[in-house]
Image (cartoon, rainbow, N blue to C red):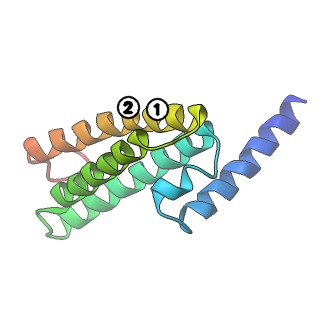
Protein backbone atom coordinates (compact mmCIF):
# COMPACT_ATOMS: atom_id res chain seq x y z
CA UNK A 1 0.00 0.00 0.00
CA UNK A 2 2.84 2.40 0.86
CA UNK A 3 4.57 1.72 -2.44
CA UNK A 4 1.33 2.24 -4.36
CA UNK A 5 0.73 5.56 -2.60
CA UNK A 6 4.31 6.66 -3.31
CA UNK A 7 4.00 5.67 -6.97
CA UNK A 8 0.66 7.47 -7.32
CA UNK A 9 2.01 10.67 -5.73
CA UNK A 10 5.06 10.53 -7.99
CA UNK A 11 2.83 10.14 -11.04
CA UNK A 12 0.60 13.04 -9.93
CA UNK A 13 3.65 15.22 -9.29
CA UNK A 14 5.01 14.52 -12.76
CA UNK A 15 1.61 15.42 -14.22
CA UNK A 16 1.49 18.63 -12.17
CA UNK A 17 4.98 19.64 -13.27
CA UNK A 18 3.99 19.14 -16.90
CA UNK A 19 0.74 21.07 -16.38
CA UNK A 20 2.54 24.04 -14.82
CA UNK A 21 3.80 25.13 -18.22
CA UNK A 22 0.27 25.23 -19.65
CA UNK A 23 -1.24 27.92 -17.41
CA UNK A 24 -0.17 30.94 -15.40
CA UNK A 25 0.61 30.06 -11.79
CA UNK A 26 -2.46 31.84 -10.45
CA UNK A 27 -4.63 29.53 -12.60
CA UNK A 28 -2.50 26.38 -12.17
CA UNK A 29 -2.96 26.32 -8.39
CA UNK A 30 -6.71 25.79 -8.70
CA UNK A 31 -6.22 22.56 -10.66
CA UNK A 32 -4.08 20.78 -8.08
CA UNK A 33 -4.21 19.97 -4.38
CA UNK A 34 -2.25 22.15 -1.96
CA UNK A 35 0.57 19.64 -1.52
CA UNK A 36 1.26 19.31 -5.23
CA UNK A 37 0.81 23.04 -5.84
CA UNK A 38 3.31 23.78 -3.10
CA UNK A 39 5.91 21.29 -4.31
CA UNK A 40 5.67 22.39 -7.94
CA UNK A 41 5.83 26.07 -7.00
CA UNK A 42 8.94 25.41 -4.86
CA UNK A 43 10.54 23.52 -7.75
CA UNK A 44 9.82 26.41 -10.12
CA UNK A 45 11.14 28.92 -7.55
CA UNK A 46 14.40 26.97 -7.36
CA UNK A 47 14.67 26.86 -11.16
CA UNK A 48 13.92 30.59 -11.40
CA UNK A 49 16.59 31.51 -8.85
CA UNK A 50 19.16 29.29 -10.57
CA UNK A 51 18.23 30.92 -13.89
CA UNK A 52 18.58 34.40 -12.34
CA UNK A 53 22.06 33.47 -11.08
CA UNK A 54 22.96 32.14 -14.51
CA UNK A 55 21.84 35.44 -16.02
CA UNK A 56 23.79 37.34 -13.37
CA UNK A 57 26.95 35.42 -14.20
CA UNK A 58 26.38 36.16 -17.90
CA UNK A 59 26.42 39.88 -17.21
CA UNK A 60 22.81 40.79 -16.40
CA UNK A 61 23.43 42.71 -13.17
CA UNK A 62 19.68 43.19 -12.67
CA UNK A 63 18.69 39.50 -12.95
CA UNK A 64 17.89 38.99 -9.26
CA UNK A 65 16.14 42.36 -9.05
CA UNK A 66 14.05 41.53 -12.10
CA UNK A 67 13.08 38.19 -10.58
CA UNK A 68 12.22 39.92 -7.31
CA UNK A 69 9.84 42.23 -9.22
CA UNK A 70 8.12 39.14 -10.67
CA UNK A 71 7.80 37.69 -7.17
CA UNK A 72 6.12 40.87 -5.92
CA UNK A 73 3.72 40.85 -8.88
CA UNK A 74 2.74 37.26 -8.05
CA UNK A 75 2.18 38.14 -4.40
CA UNK A 76 -0.03 41.04 -5.47
CA UNK A 77 -2.02 38.65 -7.68
CA UNK A 78 -2.44 36.26 -4.75
CA UNK A 79 -3.72 39.17 -2.64
CA UNK A 80 -6.32 39.91 -5.31
CA UNK A 81 -7.39 36.27 -5.33
CA UNK A 82 -7.64 36.12 -1.54
CA UNK A 83 -9.97 39.12 -1.52
CA UNK A 84 -12.22 37.41 -4.06
CA UNK A 85 -14.71 34.60 -3.73
CA UNK A 86 -12.94 31.31 -3.00
CA UNK A 87 -13.71 27.99 -1.42
CA UNK A 88 -12.28 27.51 2.06
CA UNK A 89 -9.69 25.06 0.72
CA UNK A 90 -8.60 27.36 -2.12
CA UNK A 91 -8.27 30.28 0.28
CA UNK A 92 -6.15 28.19 2.66
CA UNK A 93 -4.01 26.96 -0.26
CA UNK A 94 -3.32 30.50 -1.46
CA UNK A 95 -2.54 31.70 2.06
CA UNK A 96 -0.04 28.82 2.37
CA UNK A 97 1.54 29.80 -0.96
CA UNK A 98 1.68 33.45 0.11
CA UNK A 99 3.53 32.44 3.28
CA UNK A 100 6.08 30.45 1.28
CA UNK A 101 6.41 33.10 -1.43
CA UNK A 102 6.86 35.97 1.05
CA UNK A 103 9.77 34.07 2.55
CA UNK A 104 11.14 33.36 -0.94
CA UNK A 105 10.79 37.05 -1.84
CA UNK A 106 12.68 38.02 1.30
CA UNK A 107 15.47 35.56 0.47
CA UNK A 108 15.86 36.98 -3.04
CA UNK A 109 15.68 40.55 -1.70
CA UNK A 110 18.46 39.62 0.74
CA UNK A 111 20.57 38.37 -2.16
CA UNK A 112 19.93 41.64 -4.00
CA UNK A 113 20.82 43.68 -0.91
CA UNK A 114 24.06 41.79 -0.36
CA UNK A 115 24.90 42.18 -4.06
CA UNK A 116 25.32 38.44 -4.57
CA UNK A 117 27.39 37.72 -7.64
CA UNK A 118 26.90 33.96 -7.89
CA UNK A 119 25.08 31.10 -6.22
CA UNK A 120 28.29 30.21 -4.37
CA UNK A 121 28.57 33.37 -2.27
Residue 28 seen in the figure:
yes
Above or below: residue 70 compared with residue 80: below
* Secondary element at tag 2: helix
Above or below: residue 17 compared with residue 88: below
Q: Residue at coordinates 87% horizontally, 38% vertically from top-left? A: 4
The x, y position of residue 32, in whole percent, is 64, 48
The x, y position of residue 47, in whole percent, is 41, 56
Q: Residue at coordinates 40% horizontally, 50% vertically from top-left? A: 45
- Residue 117 located left or right of residue 27: left
Q: How many marks?
A: 2
**Which image quadrant for residue 63?**
bottom left
Q: Nearer the viewer, residue 87 or 102?
A: 87
Tell me if mark 1 has few (under 14), some (14-19) or many (20+) residues whose alpha carbon lies within 10 angstroms of its own: some
**Which disc is residue 110 wearing?**
none
Q: Nearer the viewer, residue 74 or 55?
A: 74
The x, y position of residue 109, in whole percent, is 17, 42
Q: Residue at coordinates 38% horizontally, 37% vertically from top-left? A: 98
Residue furthest to the right: 1
Q: CA distance from mark 2 to mark 1?
A: 5 Å
Residue 121 seen in the figure:
no
Q: Residue at coordinates 50% horizontally, 42% vertically from top-left? A: 85
Labels 2 & 1 near each other (Cβ < 8 A): yes
* Secondary element at tag 1: helix
The x, y position of residue 16, in whole percent, is 64, 55
**Which image quadrant for residue 65?**
bottom left
**Which disc is residue 96 wearing?**
1
> Which residue is label 2 attached to?
99
Tell me if mark 2 has few (under 14), some (14-19) or many (20+) residues whose alpha carbon lies within 10 angstroms of its own: few
Q: Nearer the viewer, residue 44 or 69?
A: 69
Quadrant where the C terminus is found in the figure: top left
Quadrant where the N terminus is found in the figure: top right
Amino acid sequence: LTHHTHDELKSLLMDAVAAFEEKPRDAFIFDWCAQLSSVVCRMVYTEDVVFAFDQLEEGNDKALTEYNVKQIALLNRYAELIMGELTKNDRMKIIMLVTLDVHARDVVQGLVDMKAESAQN
